[in-house]
Image: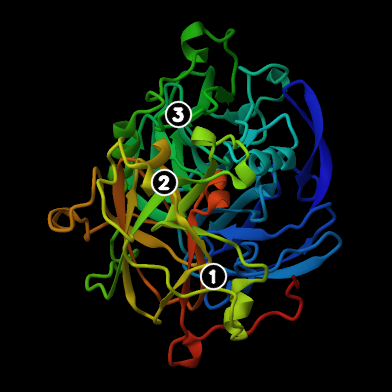
Amino acid sequence: VKEATYTRLCSTKKILTVNGQFPGPTIEAQHGDTIYVNVYNQGKQNITIHWHGVLQPRYPWADGPEYITQCPIKPGGRFRQKIIFSTEEGTLWWHAHSDWSRATVYGAIIIHPKVGTRYPFPKPDAEVPIILGEWWKEDITKVLQQMHDTGGDPNISDAFIINGQPGDLYPCSKQGTFKLTVDRGKTYLLRLINAAMNIILFFAIKKHNLTVVGVDAGYTKPLSSEYVTISPGQTIDALLSANQKPDLYYMVARAYSTGSNHHFDNTTTTAIVQYKGKYSNPTSSSSSLPSLPFYNDTNAAFSFLGGLKSLADKKHPIDVPLHIRNRIFTTISVNSFPCQDNNNCAGPNGTRFAASMNNISFVNPSTALLQAYYQHTNGVYGDNFPDMPPFLFNFTDIFLPLNLETPKRGTEVMVLDYNTTVEIVLQGTALMGGIDHPIHLHGYNFYIVGFGLGNFDIYKDPLKYNLKDPPLRNTVSVPINGWVTVRFKADNPGVWLLHCHIDRHMTWGMKTVFIVKDGDQPEERLLPPPPDMPRC
């Protein structure tokens, strides 16, 4: 991990990279492999690396989130990380998990089927990672510091990017626009990743439908769509059939944002699908942008989610928990704290922005939570994260009393018995005019058994759950004015983070931790830590 100089949007700056590359190198593996990655921190700040969506069975030591599973790798330090692939097959990604360094420190992970097995769809002629991200002209550490200093929203990004490039519509960017060259009649597997820091994105290609065949390294029933909705942290495997007349066609990504009075980057990033062959200059119809849903079209965003179904066949069975032992109902909210020392902060009404789950704004400890749990160190965390919010209210009402806006601070976790079945209802709230929240669970995939708008109804909504073929994911977007229900079996012992993948919300405290206890058998217990774990 080291600094390198990159030029975008007519200006040059140093950014943090892996091996000098931006985006970083792609990691390729086969189903069930174990690989080792030596991380050397040659930068000026602390760093950790997270292998997003890799379950790391019984081995949270290499999961990566700073002060949760490990102390950061200090400048000049190193850490040999063991990556254990198990059931994953498809596209995942890796990224920094220390402050906001993931803005430029990220790359794709591709897990191929085992030798002798094949995809549950026609083999594509080629596979291409498509990584969506954000670019700031300013140093990202300064953007974060300004947010900390003022208590307000961070400055929005200056561009969205596709494979590190802003595209034709931004100044000084046309030369670098990413181009995907295709042969007419061939099929391409696009491995889509949303590495953006703070925004959900719509993605489409002019005159081409996409056929979704997988999400978050798990296969789905084929879903043909003119566009996809992809939240920070999520991946989508989609087949692109090059079935149009030879020409140039734009692929585009643009923000989906639902919050009231919420500033966001409303620009459009582009790349080009370029057919091989001879043809005249592009016509205005083929070179124009594909249509995308309106920026705040919740129905469009969630109709795409509703179309995703697991394969749920003999070769790809599912195991949805039907009898639930641990039921958790958690609100996810943007909040505020009073400004300290009688200063006037840049949050709403002179306050400082915060965020919470069940009205607790999570505070990182000063040492790694996993280490404290493993060594039975007292005083690092509490185990009182509630399974219900402290008070019930009309969560999606846009007119809510001010006393609901201030959460408690704490380092509270929830302890789960090994192999217990868990259901979490994630309820969005309209506090502070929040936005949709992509919630990511480390160490697990979960089945998305239900979602809807409005307040969750404990009597009516479970009757509509999909227990037949729900999609299996590690990240799900919860609407500001709605809810999502997920289920999983707690069969991976360790310390696992649950958080919003919009980084400003996670920084403000929208996260909690599950500690899953060891089982009775040796193969159900935590593996020991590696000898070179970084120290705080």
The reply to whether callout 1 and callout 2 are in contact (CB within 8 Å) is no
Crowding at label 3, few (<14), some or many (≥20) Cα neighbours within 10 Å?
Answer: many
- Establish if 347 lies above or below 36: above
- The residue identified by callout 2 is 405
Residue drawn at the location 52% of the way across and 54% of the way down: 509
Residue drawn at the location 79% of the way across and 53% of the way down: 45
- State whether residue 368 appears in this view: yes
Mark 1 or 3: the one toward you: 3
- The residue identified by callout 1 is 32
- Establish if 496 lies above or below 520: above
The numbered mark at residue 14 is none
- State whether residue 120 appears in this view: no
Please provide percent x and percent y for residue 73. Answer: 76, 64
Q: Looking at the rendering, which quadrant does residue 369 occupy? A: bottom right
Q: Earlier in the sequence, mark 1 or mark 2?
A: 1
Disc 3, SS:
strand
State the residue lying farthest toward the front.
342
Residue drawn at the location 42% of the way across and 39% of the way down: 432
Q: Judge by depth and name the residue closer to the eye, 184 or 347.
A: 347
Between the residue at mark 2 and the residue at mark 3, the CA separation in whole angstroms equals: 37 Å
The reply to whether callout 1 and callout 3 are in contact (CB within 8 Å) is no
**Three-letter code for the amino acid on which mark 2 is drawn:** Glu
Between the residue at mark 1 and the residue at mark 3, the CA separation in whole angstroms equals: 32 Å
- The residue identified by callout 3 is 204
